[in-house]
């Protein structure tokens, strides 16, 4: 039967064609729709607008950007509680994204390129207007920078102290009634203009939205009548912070801070000696731990005495040795600085080693000439000798800044010295004669040597010595003194909180104030 019907109707060519067309359409739709759901990564820099379709990618990028803006906005609204809001009209407060992450309000925001959004150029800024606040949320990622504006205030529908303004006009608690304004919007930069932007100048263009309320110029000059949302006139006005909107379903948190009290400071004590390592104490008068202050005084004072030594160097003639030599018996010989001398007397040439400052006199062949003060020490020679006697401090005060003058006793050799070539050569002799008619004449001649004997010939030479003078002088040092004053803590400060009905006069009149927090009444 099937075969007979098939043969009578012929081959179903039209059905086959229809099925092929449906298959082709299905494949075409599959090829066209699949890239919409699987968006490949496209480098738009390597293609032009005619060959690259990035509409899907742009939509994804915008969504990620808006999500990050929203996260910053919500974090900022939760952060700006009553005590953190700007207080005066025109004041503002700014937090960078870095600040928000540091305050644990957010974690780092990632853009569609898997890069961290700019931590410093991304920020939130809240500014106080007459009766509300405007929050600017600016975001910069690796490809784009833009911002939104959000109007905040204490509205009747807020669950917290402030919340985001709804798109319809709502009364603000405590604000004066005014003519209706265009419905505020929250635009992206470049979109519809915002009615209030603290960072941009107003456009000056009138709103296209019609309004049933009269314009400000058409209103009567009398003060408008209050709206039902205004506060009653008998509510307390001494609260230091803005009052929250009244809601009978809630109770409100109040806070009262009591400062610490102290006794008066005592007078500064008399100065007393102390260790120079003592530290001054200059604390903050408001701190409860600031109960003592200490001031220091340092100065130079005499703390004792010590023996100070002054020293000078000078050249003196001293015996350095001797030798035995065949010599004339009538003369004594001495070698001074490698020069041999014969004395004109039999007095032995010796230095004044036994002469001291207490025995000022001539001795042996040396004649005492007296004592003198010298700023520069004198030098000995073969026929002169200086004996150190002491130091002269007459020009010094309690200390000498330079060396003092030195005293010396002066001596001259009177035995006569004649330079000779050897110890067997006699010295020169001098004779004089005079008469009543002629002047005295002196004749020098060669004396006889006499017999020869062996004698000890002393050797003298010039050496450098150091002569010292010692004096008791005052010792100065740094001496430290301290002076103190004290006070007592009478009572520590405290902060108390209470929950009560809105406008609790018993609390407000006793220094309590609203914190901005509320909770449902049980």
Image (spheres, rainbow, N blue to C red):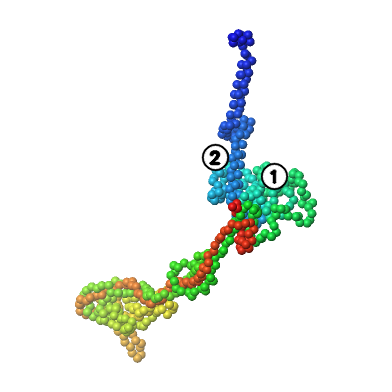
Binning the other alpha carbons within 10 Å of mark 2 as few (below 14), some (14 to 19) or many (20 upward) gives few
Label 1 or label 2, whichever comes before in sequence order: 2
> Based on the displayed image, in which of its 4 quarters is residue 500 positioned?
bottom right
Residue at 63 percent of width and 45 percent of height = 147
Q: Position of residue 117 (x, y in %)?
A: 56, 44
As displayed, is residue 394 above or below residue 32? below
Disc 1 is placed on an element classified as loop
As displayed, is residue 470 above or below residue 101? below
As displayed, is residue 53 above or below residue 5? below
Residue at 62 percent of width and 21 percent of height = 22
Q: Is residue 326 left or right of residue 70?
A: left
Disc 2 is placed on an element classified as loop
Q: Residue furthest bottom?
A: 436
Binning the other alpha carbons within 10 Å of mark 1 as few (below 14), some (14 to 19) or many (20 upward) gives some
In terms of depth relative to the viewer, which is nearer, 447 or 225? 225
Q: Is residue 298 left or right of residue 418?
A: right
Residue at 68 percent of width and 42 percent of height = 191
Label ID, residue 193? 1
In terms of depth relative to the viewer, which is nearer, 137 or 305? 137
Residue 295 visible in the displayed image: no
Which residue bears the numbered disc 2? Answer: 114
Label ID, residue 268? none
In terms of depth relative to the viewer, which is nearer, 442 or 84? 84
The CA distance from mark 1 to mark 2 is 32 Å
Q: Residue furthest front?
A: 522
Q: Quadrant of the N terminus?
A: top right
Q: Position of residue 2 (x, y in %)?
A: 59, 10
Residue 102 visible in the displayed image: yes
Q: Position of residue 108 (x, y in %)?
A: 54, 45
Give the total number of marks visible in the rendering.
Answer: 2
Q: Position of residue 510 (x, y in %)?
A: 61, 63
């Amino acid at each position: 039967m099937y075969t007979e019907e098939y043969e009578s109707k012929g081959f179903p060519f039209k059905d086959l064609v229809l099925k092929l067309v449906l298959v082709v359409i299905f494949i075409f739709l599959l090829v066209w729709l699949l890239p919409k759901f699987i968006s490949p990564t496209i480098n738009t820099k390597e293609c032009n607008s005619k060959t690259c379709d990035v509409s899907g990618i742009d939509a994804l990028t915008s969504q990620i950007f808006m999500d990050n803006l929203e996260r910053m906005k919500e974090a900022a609204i939760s952060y700006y509680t009553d005590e953190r809001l700007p207080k005066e009209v025109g004041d503002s407060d700014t937090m960078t994204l870095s600040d928000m992450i540091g305050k644990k309000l957010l974690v780092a925001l990632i853009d569609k390129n898997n890069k961290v959004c700019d931590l410093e150029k991304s920020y939130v800024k809240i500014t106080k207007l007459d009766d509300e606040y405007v929050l600017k949320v600016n975001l910069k990622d690796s490809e784009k920078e833009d911002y939104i504006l959000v109007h905040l205030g204490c509205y009747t529908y807020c669950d917290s102290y402030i919340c985001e303004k709804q798109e319809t006009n709502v009364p603000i608690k405590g604000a004066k009634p005014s003519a209706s304004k265009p419905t505020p919007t929250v635009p992206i930069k470049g979109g519809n203009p915002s009615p209030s932007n603290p960072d941009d100048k107003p456009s000056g263009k009138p709103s296209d939205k019609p309004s049933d309320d009269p314009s400000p110029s058409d209103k009567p000059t009398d003060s408008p009548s209050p709206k039902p949302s205004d506060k009653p006139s008998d509510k307390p006005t001494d609260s230091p912070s803005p009052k929250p909107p009244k809601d009978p379903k809630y109770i409100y948190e109040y806070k009262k801070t009591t400062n610490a009290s102290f006794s008066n400071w005592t007078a500064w004590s008399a100065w007393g000696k102390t260790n120079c390592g003592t530290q001054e104490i200059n604390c903050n008068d408001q701190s409860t731990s600031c109960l003592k202050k200490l001031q220091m005084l340092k100065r130079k004072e005499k703390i004792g005495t010590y023996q100070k030594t002054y020293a000078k160097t000078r050249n003196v003639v001293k015996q350095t040795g001797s030798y035995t030599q065949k010599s004339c018996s009538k003369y004594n010989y001495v070698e001074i600085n490698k020069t041999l001398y014969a004395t004109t007397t039999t007095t032995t040439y010796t230095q004044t080693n036994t002469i001291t400052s207490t025995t000022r006199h001539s001795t042996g062949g040396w004649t005492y000439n007296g004592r003198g003060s010298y700023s520069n020490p004198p030098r000995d020679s073969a026929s002169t000798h200086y004996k150190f006697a002491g130091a002269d401090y007459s020009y010094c005060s309690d200390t000498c800044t330079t060396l003092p003058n030195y005293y010396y006793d002066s001596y001259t050799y009177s035995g006569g010295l004649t330079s000779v070539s050897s110890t067997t050569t006699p010295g020169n002799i001098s004779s004089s004669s005079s008469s009543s008619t002629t002047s005295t004449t002196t004749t020098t001649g060669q004396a006889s040597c006499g017999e020869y004997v062996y004698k000890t010939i002393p050797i003298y030479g010039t050496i450098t010595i150091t002569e010292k003078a010692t004096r008791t002088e005052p010792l100065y040092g740094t001496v430290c003194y301290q002076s103190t004053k004290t006070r007592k803590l009478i009572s520590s400060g405290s902060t108390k909180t209470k929950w009560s009905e809105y406008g609790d006069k018993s609390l407000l009149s006793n220094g309590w104030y609203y914190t901005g927090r509320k909770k449902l009444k049980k």
